[in-house]
Amino acid sequence: MKKYISDFIIVSNERLHANYGLLKLKPAEGLLPEILPGQFCQVEIKNSKNTFLRRPISVNYVDYEANQLWLLVRKAGAGTSALIDASEGDKVNLVYPMGNGFSVPVDKSRRLLLIGGGVGVAPLLYFGEVLKNAGVDVNFLLGARSKDDLLELGEFYKRGNVYLSTEDGSEGEKGFVTTHSVLSEKWDSISCCGPMPMMKAVARYAVENGIDCEVSLENVMACGVGACLCCVEDTADHGNVCVCKEGPVFNIKRLKW
Amino acid sequence: MVDLSVNIGSLKLKNPVLTASGTFGYGEEYADFVDLNRLGGFIVKGTTLNHREGNPYPRMVETPSGMLNAVGLQNKGVDYFINEIYPRIKDVDSQVIVNVSGACVEDYVRVCEKLAPLDKIEAVEINISCPNVKQGGMAFGTTCTGAESVTRAIREAYSKTMIVKLSPNVTDITEIARAVEAAGADAVSLTNTFLGMAINVETQRPYLSTVTGGLSGACIRPIAVRMVWQVANAVKIPVVGLGGIMNGRDAVEFMLAGATAVQVGTANFVDPSVTVKIIDYIEDYLVRHGISSAGDLIGAMTV
């Protein structure tokens, strides 16, 4: 897929809870190209004097009608702080769309569970939309520390069944996504994005129960195009491969977890 | 019209802008952002005799105005380059230089011998300065005898242009430069990354799997400019300057310090189209200053 380096304008920047920003961007010129669910953008950071590299941020949603691309950003450090503090009308430069996305099943009758944790729910919203449009039943299992960390719930409810878990029990079932009752139903495949311990626990569950499973990795990255070889993940079939280029989505069969 | 071309020994470059090894893949990775035919050339990633898996993850951490890396020369070996990559890039209308690394002198020589018959590859860059491998690499680049032995052995086996990439992690880089010049190098390039280290104070663990790594980016530029100036005054062969070049201004700075050509590395990660902007800047700079040829910038600083 062709990649672009383009300026975008921030159409809106909504603070979700204290630590998350939902940025809706439109290209400064032209229309958005095709973007696959699970792909990411390399976002240039301005107004942060010690931030040197771009920040890889998942595509949260693509609204082709409004010509808007959404990024859901968690404040993790100086770079992401500067990003969620940006103002409407500000320009932001993106290199995109990067990497490969989640798999859309050919067989529409397959039972798919999309599991997201924390800000890892971000790519699942757009994936859910694509699946819904493809005629696949969409089921989301979303987990967070507490109620306030569950993001964009209204958007998820529009696209499928939503099951929730929080560590403190303030919303949905108390515990982790891996202890949620819906997981014990019969699933054909799981697509997962979230913190590493969560993804590993989900992967273990999937292996034990013979469920096909893919996860979206967020290894520390520099170039985003497979040139610098910094973000590698050790795979069973090809040794160290770049998460930015061969991922970020991997079938767990390839990983040495 | 200004003349942007420069020569490194017998190697002709249409302009002084090259990309640094390990930051530009095989060129193809950047083809969506850069017309590769516009570059003076690109230097493909460190190539060794055999496949290397490199170091374990994590290999990178951002630092103020720069980054540390500890990739460790991951590559699929010279035969893979010759059979799989070379046919795809051999028709590009700019120079393709292969960066060569090895664990012992024999390895370097054998890789160069395998590359020599490839028509498109008119030059190699000999990496005696990788800080991220246990054997070879920087070990050859930090003593005059080590640097000289590798250079001399390759010179006997390889007749095309040989650029030797120097490590800045030495007491006096001019001594190493003189040693490789005496041993037959056609040019030197400097600097490779600076050995550095960063610790996550919350976990009290190093950020990199190898503890130490190579520092690159804007933060190293003034040190690299100083070293280029020192080396350019110490040797007669051309100097290729690199280290923290982020834009056209920085490239001109290296040329004024004595560089015949420059390499752009880490800046490609920040702006994947930066190389063409640098070429445009140099052209505009020459026009603005009434200078007819890029060659007239080399060492043109007046003190």
Image (spheres, rainbow, N blue to C red):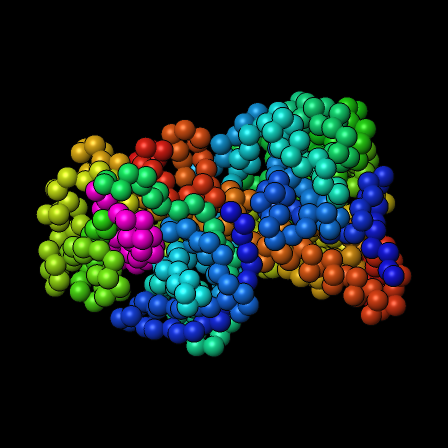
| For residue A22, side relative to residue B50 (left or right) | left
Is residue A163 shown to the viewer in this render? Answer: yes
Residue drawn where x is 65% and y is 46% of the image: B20
Residue B117 horizontal/vertical position (percent): 75, 25
Assess whether residue A132 is covered by the magenta stretch: yes
**Overall secondary structure of the magenta stretch?**
helix
The image shows a total of numbered marks equal to 0
Which residue is nearer to you in this view: B301 or A78? A78
Q: Which residue range is magenta in the image?
A: A111-136
Residue drawn where x is 55% and y is 44% of the image: A227
A202 relative to A44, above or below: above
Residue B7 horizontal/vertical position (percent): 84, 46
Residue B129 horizontal/vertical position (percent): 63, 40
Which residue is nearer to you in this view: A166 or B134? A166
A184 relative to B146, above or below: below
B81 relative to B222, above or below: above
